Image: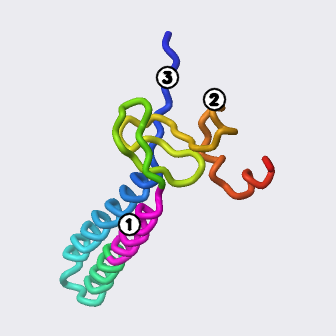
Amino acid sequence: MAEPRLVYSSKINKIRSFALILIFAGILIMYGGILFKDTEWLMLIFFALGVLSIGFSLVVYVWIGTLSLRAVPVECPNCGKPTKMLGRVDACMHCKQPLTLDKNLEGKEFDEKYNSRRRKSKET
């Protein structure tokens, strides 16, 4: 029986997905407010929460955009497509191949904990 292959996701894609979920959640919350159109104050609360969710997603998109500009562009050795890396370890945005630029981590099991500052200070 084949061993299940773990699928990794790039940090940039994870954060973008979170922002997209916030947009859809905000729209659903506002649609939920329509159910309370007889109670005006409750409908306004739902609408305000939906707008806040969409506004927060805008903040997240701007933040990940600035992080993406500082990310290290690399070419994936597996698929050959350009991708961006955040931190010491990341995954290819296209084929999910684990990537690292740290020579000390080459050949080691992929673990996103290598990006934490606490773990980095223990290794040095």
Q: Quadrant of residue 38?
A: bottom left
Q: Which residue carries the number 2 mark?
A: 107
Residue type highlighted by circle 3: Pro
Q: Distance from label 2 to label 3 (Cα)?
A: 19 Å
Crowd rating for badge 3 (residues with CA inside 10 Å; few <14, some 14–19, many 20+):
few
Q: Which residue carries the number 1 mark?
A: 65
Q: Distance from label 3 to label 1 (Cα)?
A: 33 Å
What's the magenta region?
55-71
Query: Which residue is located at x 80 percent, y 50 percent?
Result: 124
Depth check, mark 3 against mark 1: the one in front is: 1
Depth check, mark 2 against mark 3: the one in front is: 2
Q: Secondary structure at mark 1?
A: helix
Q: Quadrant of residue 40?
A: bottom left
Query: Which residue is located at x 34 percent, y 39 percent?
Result: 81
Residue type highlighted by circle 2: Gly
Residue 34 placement (x, y as % from top left): 19, 76
Q: Which residue carries the number 3 mark?
A: 4
Mark 2 / mark 3, whichever is N-terminal = 3
Q: Please name the predominant secondary structure of the magenta segment in the image.
A: helix
Residue 48 placement (x, y as % from top left): 31, 83
Crowd rating for badge 1 (residues with CA inside 10 Å; few <14, some 14–19, many 20+):
some
Q: Position of 104 compared to 20: left or right?
A: right
